[in-house]
Image (cartoon, grey):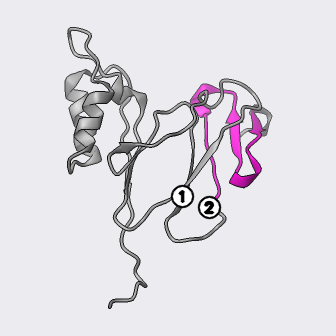
Amino acid sequence: MDSRKCQTARVPRQSRGTFPVVKDAEQTALRTRPCPCHLPGAAALANAGHLAPYLNGKEMAMEGALPLGITECAEFSMTHFQLAPGDRLVLMSDGVAEAQDERGHLFGFERINTMLQQPITAAEVATAAQKFGQEDEISVPAVTRKANLNAEVA
């Protein structure tokens, strides 16, 4: 990464992470360090212009922010939370909610909420939005925390 194009954004102390803001849109990057508490399932997210994530099918409350690279020295709030065994975190790009059919109707948040209330894969969400009418990129990464490997069995 060209250091002349990169400026490290200010991040709240409790996050202990850095976010390089790259001035060229094609090279926007995000880097975080692992959660410092080292507790099983500890997680931290920063929003840089994305939709709020869904935890177990429910939209998480998360402060919005401008996308990376829009302004220099931007600040991004961090959300810290715990993933219990079996918890599922789904993230998605705005291309999912903003997919439009031939009449201009949006795929929308209501449809996303309904889909995520049922057992569904990230690929199925992405495919449904693509078939509805893709206008923008569509990304739907999902993470499911597995049971603790060292847990005692009673």
The answer to if 136 sits in the magenta stretch is no
The image shows residue 143 at horizontal and vertical percentages of 39, 55
The quadrant holding residue 109 is top left
**54 on left or right of 108:** right
The Cα–Cα distance between marks 2 and 1, rounded to whole angstroms, is: 6 Å
The answer to if 8 sits in the magenta stretch is yes
- Of 115 and 101, which appears nearest the observer? 115
Over which residues does the magenta segment extend? 6-34
The quadrant holding residue 104 is top left
Residue at the limit of the structure toward the right, as seen here: 4
Query: Is label 1 in a helix, a strand or a loop?
Result: strand
The image's mark for residue 43 is: 1
Relative to 49, say whether 36 is above or below. below
Residue at the limit of the structure toward the bottom, as seen here: 154
The image's mark for residue 99 is: none
Q: Are marks 2 and 1 in contact (CB under 8 Å)?
A: yes
